Amino acid sequence: MKTLRLFPLELGRLLRSRLTWLVVLLTVLSPAAGLILYKPAYADTMLSMYLANPALAGGVAGGILFALLTIFELDRARRSRTDMLTDAAVSPHAMALVRLLALLTAAVLATGLAMLVWLPISMGLIGAVFTGVDYVLAYLLFMGLALPLAILAAGAAYQFTQRTDLSAVLLAAFAGLSLTVWADDWQLCWLNPCVWAMSDDFTNFRLFRTVAWMRLTWLGILAGVWGVSYLCIRRYGKGLLGSLGRSVRRVWRPAIALALLVCSGTAYAAQPFYDNSNPDLTAMTLYELDYAEGVTFLDRTVQVFPDTEAGAVEGRAVYRFQNTSGKEWTACFGVDPGYDLTASVGGEAVPAVRTGYEESNMALWEIALPADGEVELTLEYGGFPKDWNLSSTVQGDPEISGIYLCLENQRLFPYLLNVLPGDEDYPTTVEVTLPGAMLAIPFGTSEAEVVAEHRDGTRTWRYASNSTGGILYAGDYVRQDIQAGGMTIEFYYGRKHQAVMEAAGAADAVRAVVDYCTEHYGALSFGTGDTLKLIQSRVAGGGYAVDGASLLNEEDFTTANLDDTGKGAIPGEVFIHELVHQWWGLGNMFDTADETSPWSSEGLTVYTTYRIVKELYGEDYAQKYYVDQWRQEVDDYFLNFYVRRPEYLEKLPEAERLNIAGSLSGVRHYSEMPLKILKAEQLVGGEAAMDQILHDLFNREVDPAYPYLTYQDFLDACHLTEEELDLG
Amino acid sequence: MGKIFRYECRRLLWNKFFAGLLLVLLFYGWQVLTGVTILGVSHTAPFSPWSFGDYLSRMVPLLWIGSLFFLTFFTSGKARRAAVLTDAAPMEPRRYALARCAAALAGAALLALACLAEAAVFYGWYFDWYGWEELALPALAALVPPLLFALGSGWLLGWLRPWLVYVWMLVPFALPALPLPEALGLWDGSFFTAYPLTLGALDPAFSLPGGAAAAQGALLLAGAGLLALRPVGSGTGRRTGGEEIAREK
């Protein structure tokens, strides 16, 4: 009761202080730094530039300012040597709580004022893609929650040390670590969350959930630490331990602090967003499992129910197998690590064992199955999907909302790992139930159709496919059909993006790329048929392609790109790369990439992208953003200390070794090989000669026994040797 | 004089601030070493003079703050009030101030040595590397000028207004945001990552270009000069807390 009575008095005193208002004012102004100085979100989307960056800058600056204010306020009585008097009048514990509440209230006030001040500015800067939900959540999570964290940290530091100097040093180190060494660890960067992009056209709930988890975990940890420091508040002239001894006599105090620490520690360890996949990116354990002897796949029927409110997925998959071995066997599945799984055969439950091994964003499950000739296995699965741990610095996937979702492979249904296909490969029927406004788009040649409309406004879509996995996009999409290269391109993009796509002449850009490839290398083959899907994804670091479908990144066509006149007619380049993959890299054209060789589908694709960009944007642009960058990356790779001196890499602990090795992978495929092809182009006589060679390779007679295009094939076609393409 | 120096050293170093600062510094340093330095900078080894210099550059802001906090032992209002007594002691104020400066320098040097020792442990533990003599020059270039300047300028600012020392602590955090010329790359830490790339050699030996050497030399001289010309005590110059107390009485 006393605390409640003192709170308005303390708050009134705090709000009469000019320093408090200075801190509030600077906090309100601090988002401006995100427009000029501090830009951690580097994507070109409007929300990244004009919402994420200002809110993040406000969080960092406001957090530091409020932490300093906290130390200043907590030291006020001691500094003015009135602590003896105030301690005699009011319990120091009560006063600490009241001060904390008053400071937190001031932080709420500052956040509210900042949101009010920046609302019209943000609306003006962001334009048509502004939404109130994004604005409120961004300011509350990216900025608002940084302030209480900083107040708790600074308060705890002061209550432990009872010194302003040591508290300031602790705070500087704690904030410094978050801003530098911990900046790429999404759970540790308490002051500046890992936010690299926000989507303009689709939703950002997964990103918000991730940041909220980090913030709330730290809130629990710092509240717990503050609780322990509360026990150390000096009383009766005793020191830290003496005061602690007195304070713990009221058992509920340490109990609350410990409970907070245990809960937040658990929340830290059991975070539901990222998996524990093997950090060795070259590991292929799941793909090298022995096939079940005498067992073949017959067919699969899947029903998927995305929960667009919770961002989760429920599903039911029925697999039919033919077993000619007459023996019991074990089916192995790769399942999204966030999902749980139960299995039954003929209505009888069978044990499904999660082995604990995770690789490539898949958890390995084993299910022992009977020796029956034909087995029908039913899997009930679902949960909140986890993303691959190597993506933790590019948060935001997998987004599942009423506007957008993307379910890839093991996230759509359990991925069968150790059964060979039957005569008909992997016949699969997928049914997915979605909100009425969403369009289901299988990523591939399949077409989905509505088979049921439900009373709650949802619709069930069905499509058939024939592959080991599958990718499904769904969202509030617009479809535009484009004729190019002798085929129809089904171009899907977000409804909110329609104006930008039209202003950018996106259809013409797509047509130009397809026509270029068709003219230079030939019409598409490999069973893609007469249609090709080009689907706009939510803002992502890159893209991918499969037979009959390529991805277009949201960043390819943005308002910021439209304003960049230096980029010519086509602003985006990820979609060019992914379209080119229809020519180079699909339909079993390349064998599994060998980590020791730079040869893969990426080399020819990156080279062709460079050629298209050179034709569209000019030689200078292509030289600067392609050739020069490849050279720089290849130089960096071969000059890297650990590449030159691998014996030192071996000396490092495994975690560090894999981390460094992982960070270096990719350069050989994406930079070294394109440079080699460029060198080959010069050696064979120029672009026209290389175009002819690539045309012949694309249209070569394929050996069904080994249909892959090898490096040796390429060298033979160029009449060159591997040594001649040495970049030395 | 020696007795005063020992007394001031004990006052500065035998307290929970120094112990706490040391712990914070070691924790921060280990995070930098295992998170950043381990990768090496500018294609050089983690134990190259450049990577080591980058590590030290990242430690300088905390060392700077720590050194300035040492000065608050002498420039705070509390210390000024105690100056009424020390001024009355039969010791020349200049020598008294010299002893205090030496104690602050010793404190800063101990903190710097802790950082160096931590790096040595890291290099030995992770890489079995013990060629520490190669690292002496970058350590001197990266640490001595800024820390000496911190003490010299901090002493002057603290004497003018005690709160200015606290504002001065923010300087190393502001420098990276400023568009400094290349010659001042050691001030914002960019020198150790940018300069070796311009040398056109693999694993270049440590060297300082003329501009950077002049800038560090100027910083060193300015720090030393400010320390040499330090205000000698509370009895001279502007009105002191002691006088305020005396007058109030």
Image (cartoon, coloured by chain):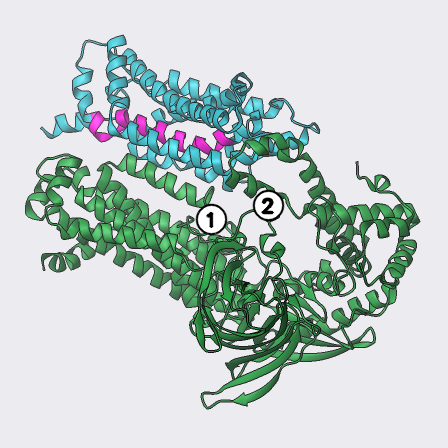
Chain colours: A green, B cyan
Residue A612 at x, y percent in the picture: 80, 60
Q: Which of the chains bears the disc numbered 1?
A: A
Q: Secondary structure at mark 1?
A: loop
Q: Position of residue A75 (x, y in %)?
A: 21, 41
Q: Quadrant of the C terminus of chain A?
A: top right
Crowdedness near tag 1: few (<14), some (14–19) or many (≥20) residues, C-alpha within 10 Å: some
Dot 1 corresponds to which residue? A185
Say which quadrant the N terminus of chain A sits in.
bottom left
Q: Name the outermost residue toward the left.
A: A88
Foreground residue among B172 and B59: B59
Mark 2 belongs to chain: A
Q: What residue span does the magenta drawing correspond to?
A: B55-80
| A375 relative position to A27: left or right | right
Residue beneath the point at 35% across and 30% down: B66
Q: Secondary structure at mark 2?
A: helix
Q: Residue at x 38, y 39 (%)?
A: A173
Image-quadrant location for residue A109 = bottom left
CB of mark 1 within 8 Å of CB of mark 2? Answer: no
Q: Is residue A220 magenta?
A: no
Mark 1 vs mark 2: which is more N-terminal? Answer: 1
